[in-house]
Image (tube, coloured by chain):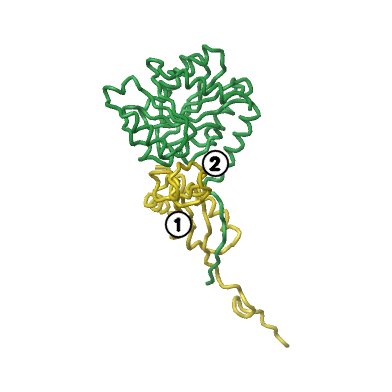
Chain colours: A green, B yellow
Amino acid sequence: MTTRIVELRRGILKKNDELAAGLRGRFTSAGVLVLNLVSSPGTGKTTFLERTLRELHARGARAAALVGDLETDNDARRLAASGVPVRQINTHGICHLDAEMVAKHLDAWESLVLAGLDYLFIENVGNLVCPSSYDLGERIRVVLLSVTEGEDKPLKYPGLFNSADAAVITKIDLAVPCAFDRELALRNINEIRPGIRIFETSAKTGAGMDGWLAYLAEQARPS
Amino acid sequence: MHELSIAMSIVDAVTEAASAYPGARVKEVRLRVGALASVVDDSLQFCWELATEGSPLAGATLVIQKLPVIVHCDACGADAQIDGVQSFRCPRCGAPAADLRQGRELEIESIELEEPEPKEPGSGAPEPVEEHL
């Protein structure tokens, strides 16, 4: 027997990366700003997104949402109350969304015209580890962290926090009862992802939503 | 726990690459995995066994080379390796460093194949014997 070394030098997730690049091209040419929302389960992604969609809808912006969960269409039903088109992706046990799932659901979503949208939000499966490896073709990856979770989440999950383009702190109306150390949380986020835009919000009271919506409008403007 | 998906992607890529060498057995698969790739070595090894069981890749060793994070510092211009993944600052000047030059890799570097010896004249199947009548 003889041995032979074959150099491959290829990305393990090459197939996903290629699909994501194709999606990104479609989103760019359609002029839609796509955001991938990632957090632990229970951070309040759906409540935050629900408020965001409602406010955008009220301001005349055209938004839609794809929402990923292992099972149930509860989140899609909650989000649909905001008045914008919503579609559920059930991963049936898979802990993250991938580009193929997004592409498949966009193709099957016949009533949705990408070119008619300003924003498409993709709510990922609640998980702070696995979604970091899977590009969905988004332009902005948003990591969310609630005041109930502990200020050291960014240090515990650096892979995801470092890959994010914007960070949202949710449930700030609960900051006092939770003895949330705001300075420490901001410092930890900045230690892992220096210079990242951070929004401190409460979907319940509406605090901080204006700054977030202004950011969305600024990002959606054609450059 | 996306290591099983990762292991299955490796199986697909390696099977495809090895198909160019009929008769060869894959002995070893070498990966380069960045410190920020969110992959747990033990978990990936476990899933690799599961994913290759009963396939032509069964028994192939997975060798994982971990790569530390290297940042580029805008303040002092250095490319420098940071220790761990808890603080993204230039180790030379201490400035925050968001520009990553290494650390997210998740790639197959190479595979090692074991191939049967090339057949030389007279070695393999018996040569047809010329009969002189």
- Give residue B43's position: percent from left, percent from top: 38, 49
User: Could you say which is closer to the camera, residue B72 or residue A84?
Assistant: B72
Is residue B66 visible in this depiction of the protein? yes
Kind of element beneath mark 2: helix
**Would residue A190 be found to the left or right of residue B75 on screen?**
left
Q: Residue furthest right?
A: B133
User: What residue is shown with label 2?
Assistant: A16
Query: Is residue A124 in sight in this rendering?
Result: no
Q: Nearer the viewer, mark 1 or mark 2?
A: 1
Left or right of B126 on screen, residue A90: left
For image coordinates 45% across by 39% down, the residue present is: A162
Check disc 2 and give the amino acid type.
Asn
Is the residue marked by circle 1 packed among few (<14), some (14-19), or many (20+) residues within 10 Å? few
The correct choice, above or below, for A199 with respect to A193 in the image is above
List x then y, in percent, for residue B119: 61, 74
A131 and B24: which one is in front?
A131
Question: Is A63 placed above or below A15 here?
Answer: above
Q: Which mark is residue A18?
A: none
Q: Which mark is residue B65?
A: 1
The alpha-carbon separation of the residues under discs 1 and 2 comes to 22 Å
The chain carrying label 2 is: A
Q: Quadrant of residue B2?
A: top left
> Which kind of residue does numbered mark 1 sit on?
Gln
The secondary element bearing badge 1 is classed as strand
Residue A165, given in percent of the width and then of the height, sits at 49, 33
Left or right: A152 as drawn, with respect to A167:
left
Q: Are marks 1 and 2 on the same chain?
A: no
Residue A155 sits above or below residue B78 on the image: above
Q: Neighbour class for label 2 at 10 Å: few (<14), some, many (≥20)?
A: many
